[in-house]
């Protein structure tokens, strides 16, 4: 082949119209992602963008909105037990999943019902 994939540029999750402040609270304040400015030409579409490490998560406005129940991003973390305690402290519920050998893994939903997987390889 004359092409190859290099990395993921960004992940986009959908959210309902007017939900930017809720997204900032969840992805920024609770998960600790850094908000980044959207390009000027895209600001009128709504939504909000975040980054952590070298990855971006874009929250895009979709009308009509329907959350992703099965499709999801999976974020690898260090110290997942500390994250679990942080989530509980912030009233964010999650489901522990022990079906992936070698991983400590949880599933949660963002405030809009989109599924998110978080795991730590052990």
Image (cartoon, grey):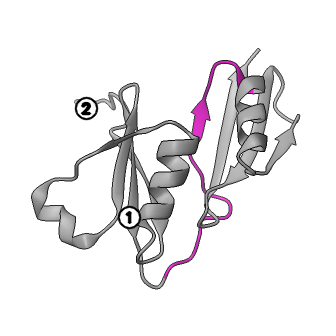
Q: Label 2: few (<14), some or many (≥20) within 10 Å?
A: few
Dominant secondary-structure state across the stretch colored magenta: loop
Q: Residue 15, relative to residue 74: is it above or below?
A: below
Where does the image place residue 120, in percent across and percent down from the top left? Answer: 70, 23
Of marks 2 and 1, the one in the foreground = 1
**Residue sitting at x 76%, y 41%:** 89
Q: Residue furthest right?
A: 98
Q: Which mark is residue 12?
A: none
Count the labels in the image.
2
Q: Which residues are magenta?
A: 65-80
Q: Left of 9 or right of it: where is 71? A: right
Q: In the rendered image, which residue does mark 2 sit on?
A: 3
Q: CA distance from mark 2 to mark 1?
A: 29 Å
Q: Residue furthest left?
A: 41
Rendered image quadrant of residue 40 = bottom left
Q: Label 1: few (<14), some or many (≥20) within 10 Å?
A: some
Give 1 or 78, whichever is nearer the viewer: 78
Kind of element beneath mark 2 = loop
Q: Residue 89, relative to residue 20: is it above or below?
A: above
Q: In the rendered image, which residue does mark 1 sit on?
A: 60
Rendered image quadrant of residue 87 = top right
Q: Residue 59, relative to residue 106: is it above or below?
A: below
Where does the image place residue 52, in percent across and percent down from the top left? Answer: 42, 31
Rendered image quadrant of residue 33 = top left
């Amino acid at each position: 082949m004359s092409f190859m994939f290099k990395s993921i540029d960004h992940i986009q999750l959908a959210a309902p119209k007017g939900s930017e402040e809720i997204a900032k609270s969840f992805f920024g304040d609770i998960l600790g992602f850094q908000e980044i400015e959207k390009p000027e030409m895209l600001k009128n579409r709504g939504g909000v963008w975040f980054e952590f490490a070298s990855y971006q998560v874009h929250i895009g406005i979709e009308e009509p909105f329907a959350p992703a129940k099965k499709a999801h991003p999976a974020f690898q973390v260090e110290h997942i037990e500390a994250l679990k305690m942080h989530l509980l402290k912030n009233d964010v519920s999650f489901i522990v999943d022990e079906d992936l050998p070698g991983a400590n893994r949880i599933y949660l939903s963002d405030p809009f019902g989109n599924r998110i997987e978080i795991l730590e390889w052990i």
